[in-house]
């Protein structure tokens, strides 16, 4: 099949997927500027059914994406949806949408998200759910935001945290960590000129780092052109990566300098405002998933969390897939979603 035909097939896959992306009904329950919290309305109420009990008895869980990534990653397709699986298992999911920053947001820092958006989102979920406690689950740096929030605020209202592909030791991030540390300070003038780091730049870097895997997926697409379910899955992931949103300039510079170059998260020297954040202050159980073939957040960068928390409080589980596949791939429901639901529901007596 000529390359042009493969690209046309890729376009078809995205068209097939479009209607199902982020299709689970959601209700906005809180908004501040560009960011919002939405309650997942699933399972849907039957027509004419009595109103649900108040308060809803299901334990609330707030899902946190990383900056640059839309919350659609938690709701890729009706038959392949993390939020639906959590709801089916008896949890009450909420999603945090960090919005789409533009040049007016260039001075936002990581501090603003961890000390501002995260506690406000937690407050909003507890208020709407009429609950005293909730769980947090985050993907990539969204998981790190969950950990940093609890560490910074000693927030005992957070009962459990699940993180997926969330690095802690950024000096163990391989080529990406090396590139980030090298770029720290050197590209500040470029970031200042742009105001924000465009999403397409991150996508281009991701494709370069994916290398042969990205090319192999194109040929697999060709071989499975008659498989509509596969095409929808492929189209959802393609839409995820092509839909990355900008990163506020100051936050990105801070990420490169303090997090990647100086490794302050792992060294417990990260300071937001006057708060020095130590991951050892996280007092609730944590379950962290690491992708076996993740080239963005390698296993070594994730298992470092064990150096901060005692064995009875943290467990790291290996899961099939790379940085995208661990959350959105075909193995994710059995390998990640179900164990996450078990953990957040407190089905196990310990995080392991």
Image (cartoon, rainbow, N blue to C red):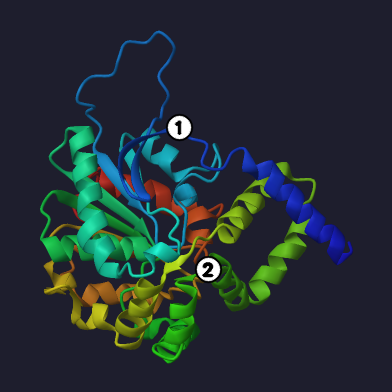
**Residue occupied by mark 1:** 25
In terms of secondary structure, where does tag 1 sit? Answer: loop
Horizontal side of residue 7 vs 96, given as left or right: right
The residue positioned farthest toward the right in the image shown: 2
> How far is mark 1 from mark 2, CA to CA?
29 Å
Q: Is residue 141 above or below residue 347?
A: below
Residue placed most toward the observer, 230 or 136? 136
Disc with the residue nearer the chain's start (1 vs 2) = 1
Callout 1: 10 Å neighbours few (<14), some, many (20+)? Answer: few
Q: Which quarter of the figure has residue 229? A: top right
Q: Residue at x 23, y 34 (%)?
A: 128
Q: Is residue 25 above or below residue 165?
A: above
Horizontal side of residue 284 vs 91, given as left or right: left
Q: Nearer the viewer, mark 1 or mark 2?
A: 2
- The image position of residue 167, as x and y in percent, is 35, 72
Horizontal side of residue 122 vs 92, given as left or right: left
Which quadrant is the C terminus positioned in?
Answer: bottom left
Q: Residue at x 45, y 72 (%)?
A: 195
Is residue 115 in sight in this rendering?
yes
Is residue 314 in sight in this rendering?
no
Residue placed most toward the observer, 16 or 216? 16
- The image position of residue 77, as x and y in percent, is 56, 41
Q: Is residue 135 above or below residue 39?
A: below
Residue placed most toward the observer, 228 or 124? 124
Which quadrant is the N terminus positioned in?
Answer: bottom right
Horizontal side of residue 231 vs 298, given as left or right: right
Callout 2: 10 Å neighbours few (<14), some, many (20+)? Answer: some
**Residue occupied by mark 2:** 198
Q: Residue at x 63, y 57 (%)?
A: 238
Residue placed most toward the observer, 123 or 33? 33
Q: Is residue 3 above or below residue 276?
A: above
């Amino acid at each position: 099949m000529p390359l042009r035909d493969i690209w046309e097939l890729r376009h078809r896959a995205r068209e097939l997927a479009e209607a199902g992306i982020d299709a689970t009904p959601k209700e906005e329950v809180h908004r501040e500027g560009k960011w919002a919290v939405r309650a997942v309305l699933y399972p849907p109420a039957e027509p004419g059914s009595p109103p649900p009990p108040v308060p809803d008895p299901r334990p609330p869980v707030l899902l946190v994406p990383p900056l640059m990534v839309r919350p659609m990653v938690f709701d890729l397709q009706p038959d392949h949806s993390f939020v639906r699986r959590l709801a089916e298992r008896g949890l009450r999911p909420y999603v945090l949408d960090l919005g789409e920053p533009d040049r007016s947001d260039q001075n936002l820092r990581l501090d603003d998200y961890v000390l501002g958006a995260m506690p406000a989102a937690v407050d909003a979920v507890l208020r709407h759910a009429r609950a005293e406690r909730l769980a947090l689950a985050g993907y990539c740096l969204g998981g790190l935001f969950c950990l940093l929030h609890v560490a910074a605020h000693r927030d005992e209202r957070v009962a459990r945290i699940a993180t997926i592909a969330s690095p802690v030791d950024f000096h163990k991030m391989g080529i990406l960590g090396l590139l980030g540390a090298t770029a720290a300070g050197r590209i500040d003038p470029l970031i200042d000129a742009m105001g924000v780091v465009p999403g397409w730049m991150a996508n281009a870097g991701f494709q370069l780092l994916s290398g042969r895997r990205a090319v192999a997926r194109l040929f697999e697409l060709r071989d499975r052109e008659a498989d509509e379910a596969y095409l929808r899955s492929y189209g959802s992931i393609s839409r995820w990566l092509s839909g990355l949103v900008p990163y506020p300039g100051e936050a990105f510079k801070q990420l490169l300098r303090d997090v990647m170059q100086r490794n302050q998260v792992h060294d417990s020297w990260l300071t937001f405002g006057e708060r020095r954040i130590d991951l050892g202050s996280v007092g609730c159980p944590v379950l962290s998933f690491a992708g076996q073939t993740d080239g963005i957040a390698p296993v070594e960068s994730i298992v470092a969390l064990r150096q901060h928390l005692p064995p009875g409080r943290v467990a790291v589980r290996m899961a099939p897939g790379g940085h995208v596949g661990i959350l959105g791939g075909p193995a994710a429901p059995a390998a990640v979603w179900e164990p996450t639901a078990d953990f957040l529901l407190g089905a196990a007596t310990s995080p392991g």
